[in-house]
Structure formats: structure tokens, C-alpha cells
Image (spheres, rainbow, N blue to C red):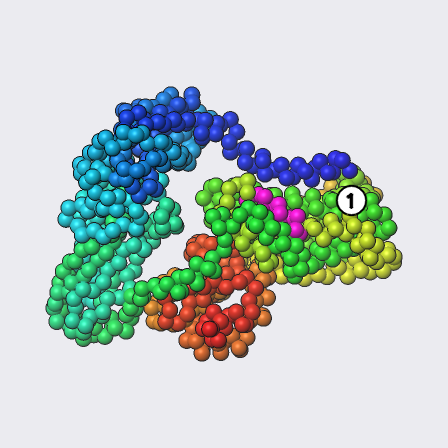
Amino acid sequence: MRKLLAGVFAVFTLVGIAHAQSDEGLLPVEQAFKLDAKITTPGTIALHWDIAPDYYLYRSRIKSKTSQPDVSLGAIALPDGEKKHDEFLGDVEVYHHSIDATLPYALSDSAQKTLAVTVTAQGCHQIDPKICYPPHPTTLTLAVPASRAAAAPMDAGAPGGATLSSAARTPNTLIAPSGATAERAPVASPFTLGAGSSLSAGADRTPLPAEQAFQFEAIAQSPTAILARWTMPKGYYLYRDKSSVALAEGAGDKLGAPHWPTGTDHQDEHFGSVTVYFDQVEVPIALARESGAAQTVKLHAEYQGCQDDGLCYPVMQRDVDVVMPLATPEQLAAAKATFVAAPPAAQSSSSDNAQRSQPPTPGTLGILAALLLALLGGLVLNLMPCVLPVLSLKVLGLAQSGESPAKARRHALYYTAGVLVAFSSIGLAVVALRAAGQALGWGFQLQQPVFVAVLVYILFAIGLSLSGVFNFGAGLAGVGQNLGSRSGVAGDFFTGVLAVVVASPCTAPFMGSALAYAFAASSAVALLVFLALGVGLALPFLAVGFVPALASRLPRPGAWMETFKQALAFPMYLTAAWLVWVLGNQRGIDAVGWVLVGAIVLALGLWWWEHSRYKSTTARMLAAAVLLAALWPIAQVGRLTAPTAAHATEAPDWVPYSAARLANLRAEGRGVFVDMGADWCVTCKVNERAVLDTDAFRDLLKRNNAILMKGDWTNVDPAITAFLQQYKAVGVPLYVVFRAGVSGNGQALPTVLTPGAVALALGSGAP
């Protein structure tokens, strides 16, 4: 028992192991790059880095900023570094051993007593393991000397050689590059700063004037279409959501919705997850014209962009004239027939609803709250329909333990160990895939047809065992005898593993917030959340095993148990049949045929093994060969490709999801109910049967001028994954409602739907 408890405790240490694996042999970032700072003379901060052996810092990655409105910073004066070519950053300068640098500052408040500055640096370890640290900010709080009034003005820090001093301007003044109209940037600093950057970027690369950094032009692409184009030099990028084009003059003409191409995902310090464009981007825009005569229309463009790892420009504006050629009546009619108006500006109320519907993130949900929600989610997961067959198995196992408290505790502990190991494995897989840049969610493993086929085999084999075709662990080549001894160690442990595997298609209440926290948190915290889910799932069996009063309520062992065991085979067969249906939707009828053939071969192999138990070694080897042959159909399933999607055909009462279609429907003023689900998602199917596949729901859509849009995540689909990430969903189901005639980000609904919640979201009965 002590060994068992030690083993269960070892599962929890996986958290520490996973966290340590990535840092093995590496110094903490504060020790690898130790920063000291002090004010040597008024107006100057002296910075000194001690760099550990085998480590180096990038010169271009050393930045500074301050959140104090009465403090202005110049550029960090750095010495020349060692020039080298970096495989990711190109030609760079790096520092070894130590750096001495200075940072000028100016104060507009003569009563300022302390100076708070954040210095961010990034460096790497140059020998195995060759790992680069993420940018590391260090906040410095320094006492301002009494003679601070003598602080010198700063000439080096402002772009384009402009000077910046406490007497010259306030911190909110914007330096507008020549030739561009600038508005105030959304943060209180001389320039809006990009992620992890500051004004000190100008020390290495002087920012270009706005008209050179972001060249905007527009031409007639056709008599009824305009092509807008932004061109940026290397190292500059444009925000998609901060850029727009409107019709300034056009005698009743209407400008359509812009068709932005696929951009680059970017994590921005101020705006969060955004889409940006490098080099050049061309955006076609439809134009609905009142007259076909040749004419000139005036476009008004507003846009914002940044220097990569440097400053971000304030919102820029430009008006351009576009000469539109003669358009025939047929061209005008065709353009109006396919015209999609640009969506109206977002309304704050809708945006607020969308924000309130977002799951908590590490910034808004504490770790203790996340662990509590995970514990409750795991507990409720016991009641989900996908877990019920396995729960029945455990009820039978606990009943077989009879009056022995020790046996009941042993059952509970080994089952719990299996649950925790399985949840730890899922957590480690999530952490590893997330580190590799893969986007995934809860139940992601069921998107893999081979995994589904293997799960069919497992459930089918359990059903055969319950039906008496063969017995698990009754002497598999002499090894199973120990595993199948009276303690039932292997059976309890792997039943716990199986409970987690079959629970993965289900999402229980309380799980969503906890999993959202886990998918966004650090590796160690993510694994803690997964372990808390496991503890919640195993908690009922732990309670029965360790509370004699509960154990005494279990039925007495008797002959009825054999009948009950055989009856439990049929839920297993049904679950396997459901997974075969899922597999058919993923890889077509050929996959169904292969897995059925494989299941028959598996049944033959298990039956043969049971009947050859006391026969010759040759007979057992032949039975083992048949069992291995059952793997061949699974290999064939893995080679199949997805068939033409069954959901691609548009049904009368719903449309398949696409981002463009969603934008078009909203531009038309239609309401949209987005249903993101999967064939393997049991919660999705329950919601469909209870709410979405009812006449009442269809009537509700008609009354609110709305349409149902479905997204199928049965297989990996990057477009649906992107939509899930937009709403910080950890998996399916996800339901988002866009009200008719209301702009904004939509409102995400709870995982478990009710008719009242759906009606309220669509607008019927809303206060």
C-alpha cells in the first residue's frame, strides 16, 4: 500500500518534471542576464548587465518604457556588439560577458521622487540545449536625485532626430511624421509601442516617415470594383482591424465590404491577438454605382501599423482619387445583384456582451478558482452519458469487493491512479503540442481516425470480456496471471484510464472556464488543472472506498453479479457502434468496412487465445498472430483520406460555416446562430436533440430574421479552430449568436443549451 501511495504521489510530481524538462541545465533568466541600474547623474540611468558564460543578449531586443505620465525616455545608448548571422533574425549584434549602457530620461513634474522604468531584454543559451528565452521585462524603481531639475534634454530618443525634453512637450504629445495626418495614439506615451518594444528601437533603426513606411494607393480594378493597396518596406506591418476605406465623394455610390486576404497572426501587447500584413497587401472592394458614366470617386483611408519590434505609428489618414471607367448597364446590374455592403461600426453593447461571454483567462481567473472549477467539472463529468458505461463497470467492481474495507480502498486507489495518469498524459500532450505551435482543444484526439479505430477495438474487447468470450489478465503468456490476481490492480488502473478516454468527447459544466485557463496558462499550471479534473472524476470512488458508511450501502455479492456483468457488455457494444459511425463520417464507408473486419479478427484472436490457454505454445503463438493481424485494418484506416464532407450540402434550414459567408449574412442584416460541433461530441448531440433540432427553435430563427450556421469539427479544420480561438473556446460545442441588425463580436452561449437562453440571446423576450 505504501508503494501504491508513493506511485499516486509520483503522478503529481509530473507537473514538476514537465516544468523542469524545458529548463534542465539552464539558468533562470534573472541569473543568466543579471541587470543592475542606478542614476549616476541627473537625467541619466546607468544600466549594467552581467551575462553568464555561454549566454548572450541581442542588441536589437533591448528596449525600455515607462508607465509614468510625467516621465519621458530617450533611446538606450548601447556599445557596439559582436556581429553575427542569426538563423531567425538575420544579421544581428550580440553581447557576451557584460554590457554597460545609459538611458536618458526627462521629467515634466519637478516633484517627481521615484522613477519606474521597465527594461526588456532577450537572449539565448548558445550551447546544448540551444534555447532562446522569451523577452524578459525587469521593472526598475529608482530614487530621483534632488538635482533632477538639471536633467538634460534628450535628442537621441525621438524619431527622425526630433528633440524631447520636459520643458518642450508633455508626454501625450504625438510626433507626427511629415506628410501624414496623425491622431492621438491609444496609449499615453509619445508613440504607441509595439509588443515588447519601446521608443528605444530608434537607436538601431530610425523609423521612416509615415508616407514611406505605409504607402497607400487605389486604382480601378474593373468598372465596378476598386483595388486598394498598401505597400510597406521590410520590417513594417499593417493592422487589418485598424485599417479601413470609406467613400468620401461619389454621388450616391456605395462601397462594399473589403475582401481582406489571409494575413499573419500576431500577438500584440495592446490589441491582443490580431492579424497583420507585411510587404504588400491588396484588398478588392466592390463599388455599387448609380451611373455608368466615367467618373472620379474619392476614397478616404484610415490605417495604422508598426515597425517590427519598434514604434507603432498613430492612426494615419489619406484621401485618394480613383478614376472609374465607363460601365455598361449589364455590369451595373450584375454588380448590384452581388453587392455586399460594408458592415456598420461595432456597437458597444454588443461588444460588451461578447466580452462578458468570454471564458476567464489567467489574467481574470485565479489559480485556486481554476482548480476548484476543474474539480467540480471532473465531478460532474461522472454524470455525462459518455462515461456511464465505465461507471457501471466500477459499480460492479466495488460490489465485488464485498465487506472488505481494504479491498474497497484498493479498488478506489488504483482507479484514481489510472485516472490521474491518463489526465496527466493528456495534459503533457497539450503542453507539448502547444509549445510546438499547434492549436487544439478538448477532445482533439478524437479528430484522429486511427485513435477512434483503436478506441472501437478497446470497447469491443471489453464487451467481449463481459460477455464471457475471454477473460482479461488470466495468464497472457504467463504475465497476465499476476495482473489478474485477486487484488485487481491492473483492472482498476486501466478502468480509470478508460474512464478518461471515453470522457474526452464530453464537456461538463464548470469545465469550460478551467480548461480555458489551462490552455492559456503556464505548463505547470496547465498540468495542475488537468490533475484537478482527474481528482474530480475519481472523487466518487474515493469516497466509497474510504467511507465505510457509503461502502456498506453497495449490494451484497451474489449470483446476480454474473448476469449484471454480462448485461454491461451491451453499453460497450453501443459505444463502439457510435464510434464506428463517427469514423464513417471522418473517413467514409471504407473506414467502416476496415474497422468492422478488424473487430471480427480481434474477436477471433481473443476467442482463440482463451481456448488455447492450456494448449501448446504453438496454438498460443497462432492466436497472438491473429491478434496482431487485427492491427492491419487500423493501418488501412490511417491511409484513407476524408471524403467529400457530408455537411457541405446546404440544408434548407442551415448553412455551412465560412468566415466570408458569416460576414455576408451579417452585412445583409441577418441574425446568425453559429453552432460549432463534432460527430464525436456527445454534448453537441444532446443539445441538438433537446434544442436545435426542434420546430420551436426553427420558428425562433424565423421570428428573429436569423439563420443557423453549422461548423463541423469532427476532423481537423483550421477555419473552425480559428473561430474557437477567437472566442477562447477550448473545444466544442461552441454557440455564438449574432443578432439581426446588431454589429459586434456576438454573444457566446453556455455549453449546455436551454430554450430560454437561446431565445434571450436571439432577442425574443430580451429585456
Relative side of 377 to 209, left or right = right
Q: Is residue 4 above or below residue 334?
A: above
Local packing at callout 1 (Cα closer than 10 Å; few below 14, some 14-19, many 20+) is many
Q: Which residues are magenta?
A: 526-537
Q: Nearer the viewer, residue 200 or 504?
A: 200
Tell me residue 577's x, y (percent). 64, 61
Asked whether residue 572 is drawn in magenta, I would say no
Tell me residue 252's x, y (percent). 19, 72
Q: Is residue 457 visible?
A: no
Relative side of 394 to 86, left or right = right
Tell me residue 541's x, y (percent). 73, 51
Q: Nearer the viewer, residue 57 or 69?
A: 69
Q: Is residue 495 above or below residue 146?
A: below
Tell me residue 563's x, y (percent). 82, 60
For residue 334, which quarter of the picture?
A: bottom left
| Residue occupying the point 20% across, 45% down | 175
Task: Look at label 1 and name its amino acid.
Answer: Arg
Quarter occupied by the N terminus: top right
Helix, strand or loop under label 1: helix
What secondary structure characterizes most of the magenta part? helix
Q: Nearer the viewer, residue 749 or 49?
A: 49
Q: Is residue 557 above or below residue 743?
A: above
Asked whether residue 528 is drawn in magenta, I would say yes
| Residue occupying the point 47% across, 48% down | 363
Q: Is residue 687 visible?
A: yes
| Residue occupying the point 33% across, 39% down | 66
| Residue occupying the point 38% across, 26% down | 36
For residue 256, which quarter of the picture?
A: bottom left
Q: Is residue 633 above or below residue 95?
A: below
- Report the number of discs: 1
User: On the image, numbered disc 1 is attached to which residue?
Assistant: 410
